[in-house]
Amino acid sequence: MIIESSIARFGQYCIFMGRVFSVPQKWRVFGRKFIQEVGKLGLDSIPLTIVISIFIGAVICIQMQLNMTNPIMPAYSTGLATRDILLLEFSSAVLCLILSGKVGSNIASEIGTMRVTEQIDALEIMGINSACFLVLPKILAFMVFIPVLVIFSIATGLFGGWIIAAFTDLISVSRYIYGIQTMFIEWYVWYTIIKAIVFSVIITSVASYCGYYVKGGALEVGKASTNAVVSSYILILLFDLILTILLMQ
Amino acid sequence: MIEVKDIEKSFDGVKVLKGVSATFETGKINLIIGQSGSGKTVLMKSLVGLVRPEHGAILYDGRDLMTMDATQLRQLRTEIGMLFQGSALFDSETVLGNVEFPLMMYTRMTPAERRDRARFCLERVGLKGADEKFPSEISGGMQKRVAIARAIALNPKYLFCDEPNSGLDPKTSILIDELLYDITHEYGMTTVINTHDMNSVLGIGENIIFINKGHREWVGNKDLIYTTTNEALSDFVFATDLFQKVKAYVLEHTHQ
């Protein structure tokens, strides 16, 4: 029964995505909506990204320094580990898990409310492909903007580590800076951006799907919002594993 | 004119529409009435293509909705305006933005021309000075007016209204009825209204279709409804003491 309903939902999701990835009816209107979504989903996520990344960067730096104090460990290990943790996992997977809570619930509740208040029906009556009109700008806007958030996250995470080095006696600034510059592999940046782009599509499309097919009232919109976040979490973790195997081997 | 021929629709094995046929006349207020659960909302949704019947035909001036391809359906929908029960205004747009929306999607008007047309429509529904307000900042009655203005922005041939009076006070309900009546006659539209409101039935019902348990049981107008022999219709329309008194008064004065 669960397998049957899962297959049915996956099929419904595929049909939905087929409708989403259609040619917009009016490019000018699409462009306007795209810019609005970049602001709403992307720019508005910058403060959260900065705050979380600074704190996590600082905590990683402290943990690395406290737990890797060993004469055989090279001096640069704390900075290097902080950088690589941020680069490989935090600024893509963990950041996207956190953003799926903000962006995913926002999208699911917005589209779900439009569904229960008949705004989506109104678009359909006007002959507008509501799935494409509402969802495509969100997916593309977040896809385009997520690399910016990732770069912000890496930079501010490293800055968080620097704060620890500069204002505590745990590690010197020069050792930290030396550590974050040591053995830098450029591919890691591309790897994290590729992962984040895939996760951005998961967050926006799953949340839109959950909102679009809401039936009922406010209670169901709330449930759809929760489902969107939970489903995104699971899919992000699954794809994190798949992409790590594919891209790092 | 819209003709519905023998349409049937089921949900989870339960037949909601059982071979309904009806004609909705051009330039008239066509009312669909019936008790809750009688199938009138499904009939309305079938008419606009939100629900697909399993059987029958829906003809818009001879064009069958059921056999249209996506392009033909899109074209037809530019000829349709709809007023939803909850108004269904776009929360993120202002009043003016809501009325401009269909113009933006379907015309090549300049922004200034769009604004002028939208303002004209808003003035036509008696709404001035609320252009820059958001739907959440105006009353239910005003929201209905904005929704009507949006529905008529493209000069539709067909106007559908789902319970236009729900949630409104009696005075505002009458104003909305009068407005719908006026614009229907002014623009020669085929207006189809799904309603529970007996004031509307007795006030503006030029062509009334009574749906009961999935069947079309009666067709007539507001004058014929007083003398109907259909018990279900009579019980439904004249359910309250007030309306029974109105019926008695009208029949008495008609005979005199």
Image (cartoon, rainbow, N blue to C red):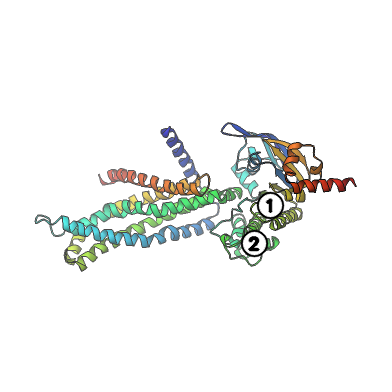
The percent position of residue A149, horizontal first and vertical second, equals 35, 58
The residue that appears at 60% across and 44% down in the rendered structure is B71
Give the residue number, with chain letter if any, for mark 2: B118
Crowding at label 1, few (<14), some or many (≥20) Cα neighbours within 10 Å? many
Farthest right residue in view:
B256
Q: Amino acid at mark 1?
A: Pro
Instruction: Determine the chain carrying the residue at label 1.
Output: B
Q: Nearer the viewer, residue A27 or B190?
A: B190
Residue B30 visible? The answer is yes
Left or right? Give the position of A84 relative to B174.
left
Given the current orientation, which residue lies at the most extreme left position?
A: A71
Label 1 SS: loop
In front of the other: A80 or B129: B129
Residue that appears at 37% across and 63% down: A47
Give the alpha-carbon distance from disc 2 to disc 1, as whole Å. Answer: 14 Å
Total marks in image: 2
- Quarter of the picture containing the N terminus of chain B is top right
- For label 2, count other residues whose C-alpha is less than 10 Å away and answer few (under 14), some (14-19) or many (20+): many
Q: Position of residue A118 (x, y in %)?
A: 57, 49
The answer to whether tags 2 and 1 share a subunit is yes
Q: Secondary structure at mark 2?
A: helix
Q: Kindly identify which residue carries mark 1.
A: B156
Horizontally, residue A176 falls left or right of residue B127, namely left
Subunit bearing disc 2: B
Instruction: Where is residue A202? Give x, y as percent.
Output: 40, 47
Q: Amino acid at mark 2?
A: Ala
Q: In screen coordinates, is A96 left or right of B89?
A: left
